[in-house]
Image (cartoon, coloured by chain):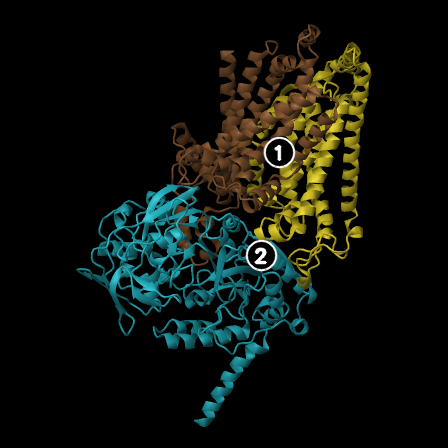
Amino acid sequence: MTQEYIPKGRAKQIARKMDKIDAASKLPPKKQLIKSRSLRKLISNKLSVIGIVIFTVIVLSSIFASVISPYPPGEVNLRESLRAPSWEHPFGTDKLGRDVFSRVLHGGRISILVGLGSALGAAFVGVLFGSYCGYKGGLLDKTVMRISEVFMSFPQMILVLLLVSMVGQSLANLLIIFILTGWGSVYRMTRSQMLSIREEEYVQALRAFGLNDFIICFKHMLPNAIGPIAVNITLSTAMFILQETSLSFLGLGVPVQIATWGNIINAANNMSILQNNWWIWLPVGAVISLFVLSINFIGDGLRDSTDPTQMG
Amino acid sequence: MKRLVSMLMVVALLMCVFPVLGEPTNSNQLSDPRVRKALTYAIDMQAIIDGLMQGKATEAITMAPPGDWRADDLTAYEYDPDKAIALLQEANWDSNRVLDVVYYYGDQMTVDLLTAIQAYWEMVGVKMEMRKLEGDLASQLWVPPSDPLNGPSAVDWDLAYAAVAALSMGDYYDRYQGGYSSNSYNPQDDKLDALIAATNATADVDEQIKAYHDLERYENEIQVNIPLYHQPVFIVQSNRLDRGDAPYGNEQYIYNWDIVNWDIEPDANGKKVLLTNGGPMEFFETPFFNPGFLMSQKVLFDRLIIADENLTPKYPGLASEFSLSEDGLTFEFTLRDGIKWHDGDDITTDDVIGSIELATKAVTNPVLLTTFKAIEGYEDYASGAAESMSGITVDGNKVTIKFANINPNVLLTFTQFAPLPMKYFKDVDPLLLQQADYWQSPVGSGPFKVKEVKMGEYATFERFEDYYGGQAKIEEIRMYPSGESDANLAKNAAAGQVDYAYTKSVEDVIALEQMDHLKVTTVDVRYTRLFYVNKFPQK
Amino acid sequence: MLSYIIRRLLTMIPMLLVICFLIFVGMELMPTDPISYMVGPEQIANMTPEKLEEMREALGLNRPFIVRFFEWLGGIARGDFGYSLTNGQPIKDIIAAKLPATIELSLYALLISTVFGVFLGILSAVKRGSTTDSALTVLGMVGISIPEFFFGLVMILVFAINLKWLPIGGRTLPEYTSYWQQFRHVIMPATILGISMTAGVMRYSRSSMLDALNRDFLKTARAKGLPKWRIYILHGFRVALTPVVVLIGFRLPTLVGGSVVVEQIFQWPGIGDAFVTAVRGNNYPLVMMIALLTVTMMLAASLIVDVLTALIDPRVRLE
C-alpha cells in the first residue's frame, strides 16, 4: 500500500475556490451535475457511514467478547467436534469441539490489537519524529531520514519476514516489528506536511513571539497536518491485519496456540476442512474481509474529506 | 540353599515392587513414576484418536507398536481421571507447577493435540504451557547432563512432544541408556541399561524378542516416558496405477515393493507416466541418512539385499548371494555380474566398500552407522592409522566383512544402505556430502534414472535400460518437489497430480479418502509419538 | 542530469553497505539453525554432539561473525555471490533460476492491475458520481480487503479442484511444447496478485484523469466540439498515464517481495518461495543475497522513477 498525497498548504483554499469556479463553468447540464455531485457526496458519506457501523460493531463485539460469546473460547469438547452451525453453535465447532463463534470474537481482540495497536504505534513514532524533524531540520532530520530510508528500501513483506525470523514469534514481537516497518511512511508524510506548514505566516509569527519549539510544533502545527495522518492510520491498520493473516499462513505469525483471526483461518489450510467444514473458514474469512473493508471505507471517506484535490 | 533362593526371590520381588510403589528419585517430581502414570491416566487418548484423528492412529502403551515385538501383558493406563487425581495426591503434586511442554512440529494437528491434552490435565489440576522450539533443536532438546545420574538437567523443558521413526527396535530403546549422546531426560537406571544391553547381545531373533519383552515390561512398570500413539503410514494410489502383486510395507524405508512391475494407464500422449511427490527442492537427498523417505531415493538407488514388506532381509539385490555366519560376526556377499551405474560404468566392489567407508565419516543413519562401526579395523580407519578397514576383504566379486562385535542389524543395514559411484566423490568432504554437485543430478543404480531436473519445479525419471531386474513397465516418473512431509499433497492429489505417494498426515488422509479416484492403504509401522519426560532435577 | 544519476548511485553504496551489515547482524541473532533444518528434527536425536560440531565446523559456521561478514563482502566485491549452505550451489545460479519465475508472475500481475486499473479508473472518472463510479470504488476496495491466501485457497477450490479449469500450481510441466500451456499456470497467482493492486492503480488513474479533464486544453477541445470519446482517449488518457507510469515503476520491486504468500500457495518456484525456505533454514548467504537484490531493485526503481518524472515534467528539478 502506498500513500498518495499531494503536498498542500495554501493550495487547499485555492483548489477549493477553483472547484467552485469549475463547477459553475460546466453550464448546460447544471441541474444534473449538482444532482450527481450531491449523490456522490451522499454515497461517499454513505460508504464511510457503513464502514463506521461495521467497524464499531466488530470492535465492540470483540471488546465484549467474554459477555457475548456463549462459550469460553478455549473450551475443548472432543465429543462435539466439527459440528455444523446450529442454535447452540452459531458458527459451528472446530476439530477440538471449540465454539468457532466464541473463538472469532476473542480472536478479534488480538487481531484488532495487533492491527490498530501497530498502526497507532507506528503513527506515534512517525509523527513524533516527522513533525519535530520536519520543523527543526538539521542533523537530526538528516539522520532520521537516512534511517527511514533503510527501512523503506525493503519490500514490506521481506522485511517483516526477516525480522520475525530474527526475533522469534510472539505477540509483542509482532507489534514491535509492525511498528518498525510501518513508521517510515508516516514519518515522511508528516515531515513533508510540516515542511510546507513551516513556511506559513502564522508559524513565522509564533516563532517571532519566541514560543517554545515543542509547543509550536506539536500544538500549533501538527493539528493542521492531522488529516493525512488519520488516513494513514486507518490504511495501515487494514494492512497490518492482512499481514497478520499472511504471516499465520506462513507459520510465522502469532504463536498458533493463541486464537487470532489469522490463526483461526489458517486451520482451513487443509483440504478436508476446506471442502467439508465451510463454517470454520468462511465466517472468519468474511469477518476479516468485512473488517478490513470497513476500515478502507472509513479511510476513503477521511481522505475525501481532508483532501480537496481528490475529486471524487 | 532354598532359603537363599527364597531370599533372593524376595529381594527380586522387592526390587520389582519398589518402583511400582513409586517415589521420586530426585528433587524433580517428574522423576516419580506415580506422577508420570497420573499424567497418562488423565489423557483420554482414545477420545483424541477418535475425535481429532478420526480413528487413524493406535493408542500407544509402550514405544513398540502392537505385534510380535510387543509384550502382551502390559498395563494400558486407560483414561481414569479419578485415579490420576489420587496418584497425584499420593505423590504430593505441586499444583502451582506449570509444566513446560515443548514441540517442534509446525502442523495444526500438533497444536490441536496439545491443546486437548492441556484441557485434560487441567481437569486433574495439572497446569501446562506449550511452546514451539525454533532454531538449533539439538542443543535445545538433546543435550545430556554432564552427570548422567544426578543431573542437573542440561535442557529447559519438562516434557517434549516428539516422535521416533524406528528402523530397528534398537532405534526405540538404545537412546534410553544412561549417558547416551541424546539422552537429556532419563537419569541413569542400571536395571534399564542392563535390559537394553540384553537386547543387543544376540543376533538370534527369538532371543531378541524375549529381551525386548522384558525391557518393555520394566519400561511400562515405571512409565519411563509417556507414549501417546502409533502413527501408521498411509499409501495413496490413483485408479490409474496397478501395483500388481507387490506388497504394501513401510514406505519410509526400502522393501520389496517391486516398482519394476507396476503398471499405469497411458496418459493422453500414450505414455505411461507415474506422477508423484518427493522431487528435489534444492538437491536430491543422500540415501545415507534417510534411506528411503523420498521417492527419488527409492527409485534411483538399489541395495545389496532386498527386504520383504516387514523389513525382514530376504532377497538378493545388487548382491547375487549373501550370507551371515551363525555367530553373526561374518557377512559375505557376491556382487552381481555386469551391473552398471546409470552412466554406463560398472558397479564395482570398490564402489561398495568406498561407500561404506564414506558413510562412516558422513552423516549416516544410526542403524547403518552402528553396523559399520562394528566392522573390524574401524577404529584404525577412523583415526587415520589405516587406509581402509581391515575387516573388509575382497576376492573377485566376493566381499567378506568381519565384525568385531555382535550387531543385531547387519542384514537390515544392507537392505537400506545404497552404494554410490565413488568416482564422483573424490574431492568431497564427507561431512559436506550433501553439498556435493553430484546431488543436483545423481547417477544411481536403481530401475529409474534422472532424465530432467528443474530444481524446485519438477524432476523426471526414465527407465534404466541396463537395470539387472529388467526394464520397468512404467516409462517415466515425474515428481513435484516436496520434503518428507508434503504440505501440497491433498491439493495436488485432488487435481489429479498424484498417482502414488505416502503420508503420515492424518489431516491429509481424511481429505484423500474422500477422493473417488484414489485408494488409501494403511500400513502399521514403527512410528511412535510420545512425550519425553525430563526426569532430571532442574538447573 | 547525468551527474545527478551518478551522485544518486554513489549514495546508494553506503546505504547498501549499512543494510548488508544490519541484515548480517540480524541473521546472527536468528535462532534458526542450518543443521537442524538440514538433518531434520526427528533424526537429529540420532546424531552425536561431536558430529554436529564437526558439521558446523565444516560449514564454516563456527568462525567469528565479523570474519564471515567481511569474507562475504569481499566475495561480492569480486563478483562471487557465495554458495547456498544447504545444497552447496552457487547463489547466482539459484537466483538465475528463480528470478525469471517471479518476474514472469509480477509482470502479469502488473499487466492485469494496469489494464484493469487504468481502464476502470478512467471509466469512473468519466462517469464520476454515477452508480458505476461508486460501484467500482467499492469493488476496488473489496479487492484489497480479502486476505490473499484466503482468496487463493478459495480460487484453488473452485477453479482447480471443482471445475478443473486451471492447474493447481507449479509453473511448467516437462511435456509442454508451447508457452500457451504454461500460461495456464500463471493465471490464478497473477490474478490474485493483480487484484490486490488494481484498487491502487484505479484510484490513481481516476484522480489524474479527473485532473486532466479540468485542464484547459481539454476544455478547449471540448469547446471545439470534438467527440467525447476522442477527448477521453486521445488527450485524457495520455495525461492520466504519466502518474500511473510512476506508480507502476514503484510497484515492480514491491511485487517481488509481495509475491511471497502467493508463491507459497501456488507452489510457484520463485524468489519469494526461495526466500521463505532460506529464512526457515537460516541459509544466511542466500537470505542476504535475496534481501540485497530486492533492496537494490527498490533503490534503482526509485532512482528511475525520479529521473522519469524529471524527464516527463520539466517543472520537477532534480536536487
Camera-near label (1 vs 2) is 2
Q: Does A10 sit left or right of B246 as displayed?
A: right
Q: Quadrant of residue B79?
A: bottom right
Residue A90, above or below A157: below
Which chain has been coloured cyan in this picture? B
Q: In the rendered image of this protein, does residue B476 appear above or below residue C103?
A: below
User: How far across and how far down the image is residue C85, in percent?
Assistant: 42, 42
Label 1 chain ID: A
Query: Is residue B290 shown left or right of residue B377?
Result: right
**Numbered tag placed on residue B40 in the rendering:** none
Per the rendering, the colour in which chain C appears is: brown
Q: Tell me residue B205's x, y (percent).
A: 37, 74
Q: Residue shown at 36%/73% (left/top)?
A: B201
Q: Secondary structure at mark 2?
A: helix
Question: With C277 as the anchor, is A231 left or right in this view?
Answer: right
Q: Which quadrant of the rendered structure holds the N terminus of chain B?
A: bottom left
Q: Nearer the viewer, residue C66 or A69?
A: A69
Element class at badge 1: helix
The residue beneath circle 2 is: B110
Q: Nearer the viewer, residue A194 or C307?
A: C307
> Label 1 sits on what residue type?
Thr
**Few, some or many C-alpha atoms within 10 Å of disc 1 (few <14, some 14-19, many ≥20)?**
many
Q: Which residue is mark 1?
A: A181
